Image (spheres, grey):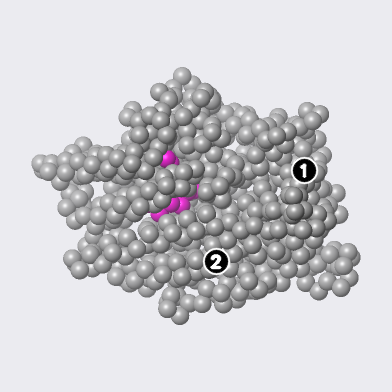
Amino acid sequence: MSSSISEQSAGQTAGRILAAPTSSWSPSGTGPVDPQSLEAWVEDRLARHRAALDGLTSAAAPRTLDNTLRAFDDAVAELAVAGAETGLLHSVCESKPVRDAAQELLQKIAQAGVELSLNRDVYRALAQVDATTADSAARHYLDRTLLQYRLAGVDKDDAARARIRELQDQATLLSLTFARNVQEGGNRVEVHDARELDGLPPDFLAAHAPDADGKIILTTDFPDYLPVMTFARSSDLRRRMFLAYQTRAYPANRQVLLDLLAVRQEMATILGFAHWADLATADQMMESAANMQAFLDDLDHASRAGAEKEYAMLLAFAQTVDPEMKQIDNASRGYWLEQYRRSAFDFDSQSVRPFFPYARVEAGVLETAEKLFQVKFRRIEKPDVWSASVSAWEVWDGTELAGRFYLDMHPREGKDKWFSAHPLVPGVRGRQLPEAALICNFPEPKDGNPGLMQYSDVVTFFHEFGHLMHALLGGRQEWAGISGISTEGDFVEVPSQMLEEFFRDPRLLARFAHHYESNEPIPAEVVLKMNRAGAFGRADWVRTQLFYTTYSLKTHAVDPATLDLDDLLRSLYTRFLPYAWIEGNRMYASFTHLTGYSSNYYTYLYDKVIALDFFSQFPREALLDSPVAMRYRRAVLEPGGSMPGREIVREFLGRNQSSDAFTAWVGEEFQPMSAAYA
């Protein structure tokens, strides 16, 4: 599963606990947040939200951008910040009482959002605005807002609108409960024989010493889970870890998910749609669930042969080690991919971990973004943030302070276990700066341990930083409602997936990927082997994404009363993937994308096509120094949500998107090594 932008259902942002003068965000004004100060802060934001709406509805005719759309946008901005900052506290705050309070307050904020979406007076006022002299961004904002009002049911009768309110409240609570169960429901795996850890790197073993009883405790947090699934020779340990990870919130979330699907289906029916998936795509680039299915069918057909070839090669290799093996199971996929890459490409992913200590990776990603987008990052000293491990940064564009961001990068108890970008404050040109945070779970340097990262971790860091730059550089709009990551939902993964590709450049990596002991830069030939090895399995990646995407679609396109979550999971798994199914897999119980993206998980595949098309425009010999980088910043990142995604694509490419780069990317493993990265 991929990482993503934040998917809090009541607003995507953060619990701003900075009291430093460089920031405006602290629910309590100064000092640590507590449930009472958070509630008071939220109530103040909601009061401002209501005051802006009162100003809108009481404004005298004629309806204009200034007296109507501006007031609406002020109300949207207040609600967005309230939901965003409270949502972050719900995800990351170290205090459980604050997390509990945040959950209740998120429901209240979501209720205000539902009321706004069904407010006929506001809708009528916006519909009366004369936008003939408005610029294209304002017209797009107004048109999209009116469409979303209609999709919310503003034109339904009183009884239908009252029922929609009830259902939206239920959906908010169910989504928050689902996420909270995953966040706080991690499992543990006990290891009684240290030989089960054979194959794992020395720093992992040093960090997991036996306790007084001789037991080694592993968690399902990613810094434990990923190395075990990649390197542990013990198939039994891998299976135990796999099942622990896939059941983190089971059985609690099974019924929560079924209830949420039933609520969504009833809402879709009231709004005149056959099912939720049609409603969820109505304002997206994809436009309909039928178009989504056609897109998925094309990828299914295009990826099947390549994936079958990959699996046959992998199984044949595994059988040279274990002649009795008939099939590779899902818990062993990562392990055998690693072993095959070592053999076929002379690449051991453990060999590059010493070049990726966390501190160097963080500095390298920031330096790359600075050079690519021609900005500067300045660390805020001694920020009063929500955890001592969080760092705060300013973004400078020449002599102009352009925004702020926060890095919360390591696991801790009670924190969200996934990887995401949280837009915090929607920037408004001349009025307020954009702010955003990254919430990740990378290995943490401590007690002499440098926090060595796998190369896939570094790719994830680049991915999330792509979201962050989109939020900040796109955050200088005239309107909060189209600021930053506010494009169609199926465009938001483009900037993140585009930036991932920069990781593959040897010259770029040599700037920061230095051995944590010798300080030697990573050799170019090692990077080329890494690229070649990493290309193996791309068709398998597409099939895995098709599995997740189709599960997301089908759960939202069938009658929830007849839906068997487990039967559907197994049937789709066996349709798309060749690895042996493992009984007890309850992946759906911790698949938080089902509450955020709902039926629209397809965006990762859809946006990968666009992202690779974008990356193909960059000259490989000068990735960071080409004028293409600034053209990309201006055409793709800076517009934020001020224009439709398709127009952004045409603006940068000079044409509609093409799948040629994606097709070449998937097939790269079977081609001679390209000289592009030589």
Tell me: residue 644, above or below residue 564.
above
**Residue drawn at (60%, 41%) of the image:** 410
Residue 190 in which image quadrant: bottom right
* Kind of residue at badge 2: Tyr
Nearest the eye: 537 or 43: 43
Q: Would you call the spot at circle 2 few (<14 residues within 10 Å), some (14-19), or many (20 or more)?
A: some
Magenta stretch in the rendered image: 5-15
The vertical placement of 80 against 258, above or below, is above
Q: Looking at the rendering, in which quadrant would you find the N terminus?
A: bottom right
Residue that mark 1 sits on? 206
Residue located 35% across and 52% down the image: 104
Q: Secondary structure at mark 1?
A: helix
Please identify the quadrant where the C terminus is shown.
Answer: top right
Q: Which residue appears farthest toward the top when viewing the image?
A: 399
x and y percentages locating residue 347 in the rendered image: 82, 48
Foreground residue among 289 and 15: 15
The structure residue drawn at horizontal position 64% and vertical position 62%, both measured from the top left corner, is: 244
Q: Secondary structure at mark 2?
A: loop
Q: Which mark is residue 569?
A: none
Q: Amino acid at mark 1?
A: Ala
Residue 582 lies in magenta, yes or no?
no
Q: Residue furthest bottom?
A: 562
The residue singled out by tag 2 in the image is 250
Q: Quadrant of residue 624?
A: top right
Alpha-carbon neighbours of circle 1 within 10 Å: few (<14), some, or many (≥20)?
Answer: few
Q: Is residue 535 visible?
A: no
